[in-house]
Image: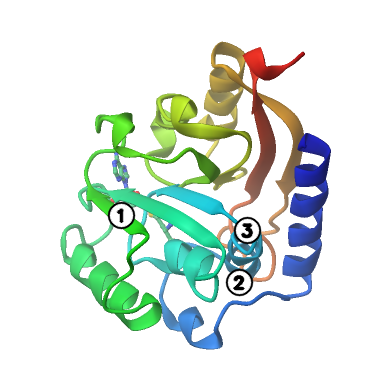
Amino acid sequence: MCEALVKRVQQAIDDAKEHKSRLPKATMDVRGWISPKIRYLLNNLCSAPDTVYLEAGLWQGASLISALAGNEDTVKAAYGIDNWRNCPKGRSMKGRFDTHVRRHLGETVPNLTVFDADCLKMPVAKIKEPATIFYYDADHYATDRGTMRFFERLASPCVLLLDDWYNHQPIQKHWRKAEAEGEMKVVKEWELPTKTKGDLDLWWNGLYVAVLRRNHAIT
Ligand SMILES: C[S@@+](CC[C@H](N)C(=O)[O-])C[C@H]1O[C@@H](n2cnc3c(N)ncnc32)[C@H](O)[C@@H]1O
């Protein structure tokens, strides 16, 4: 099962490098802290049947919309979390997020639940279905707590993505701590490069992608 997922992630990355995906072009207009390759990769990953997508750190919605748009037939459920407090322009970005979601995903998105909440505090039981893909792009200084507290709500195996892998140093240290202390272990990881800060040709500030599985599931 892990082997098949590893292959699927590799294919999703290879396709994203060539800008191949089902992502509608118009969604590129949504401003975000993200590069086109990351948009395509999120979209490719969510094109797998029965996807349950979880994202912390939504801002104006660029990454969430990239994951979901065009994947209405494959995404079973999606959960997004942001408190729109620790971001540039603050609460006004919640309005932009709502507008962008309506424009690109539709007036009602029955399988999407958005939590206006602190991802370091909200009860994780609110994530009703185990996530098959978890994109963490919220508080980078709390990547250990921010990822670990959701481990119990992740499917095994699943895919984890951490943005800003190279240009925000605490992330790597915090993720290694989370992996050492938590029950989700890395089966395979990819460190996707960047040449500059906010690299629009490559992977923004670097992207970490991993296939994880629950430790006690290892036989
Ligand atoms: C870099 S932005 C996310 C960018 C977005 N993923 C994109 O593609 O454009 C980080 C977001 O994380 C949110 N955030 C930071 N700390 C948070 C926390 N503890 N709980 C919820 N959201 C948080 C901020 O409000 C901000 O919107």
User: Quick one: label 1 or label 3, which is nearer the N terminus?
Assistant: 3
Q: Amino acid at mark 1?
A: Thr
User: Quick one: label 3 or label 2, which is nearer the N terminus?
Assistant: 2
Tell me where residue 217 sits by quadrant. Answer: top right
Q: In the rendered image of this protein, does residue 168 appear above or below residue 87? A: above
Q: Amino acid at mark 2?
A: Pro
Q: Residue at x 45, y 31 (%)?
A: 153
Q: Residue at x 72, y 67 (%)?
A: 16
Residue 90 disc label:
none
User: Quick one: label 1 or label 2, which is nearer the N terminus?
Assistant: 2
The residue tagged 1 is 113
Disc 1 residue crowd, few under 14, some 14–19, many 20+, Cα 10 Å = some
Mark whose residue sits in front, 1 or 2: 1
Please state the horizontal and vertical placement of residue 124, each as a whole percent of the image: 33, 31
- Work out which quarter of the rendered image holds the N terminus and state it: top right
Label 1 sits on a secondary structure element that is strand
Q: Residue at x 63, y 64 (%)?
A: 47
Q: CA distance from mark 1 to mark 2?
A: 25 Å
Q: Residue at x 52, y 63 (%)?
A: 67
The residue tagged 2 is 36
The residue tagged 3 is 49
Q: CA distance from mark 3 to mark 2?
A: 23 Å
Label 2 sits on a secondary structure element that is helix
Q: CA distance from mark 1 to mark 3?
A: 19 Å
Q: Looking at the image, which is closer to me, 20 or 152?
A: 152
Label 3 sits on a secondary structure element that is loop
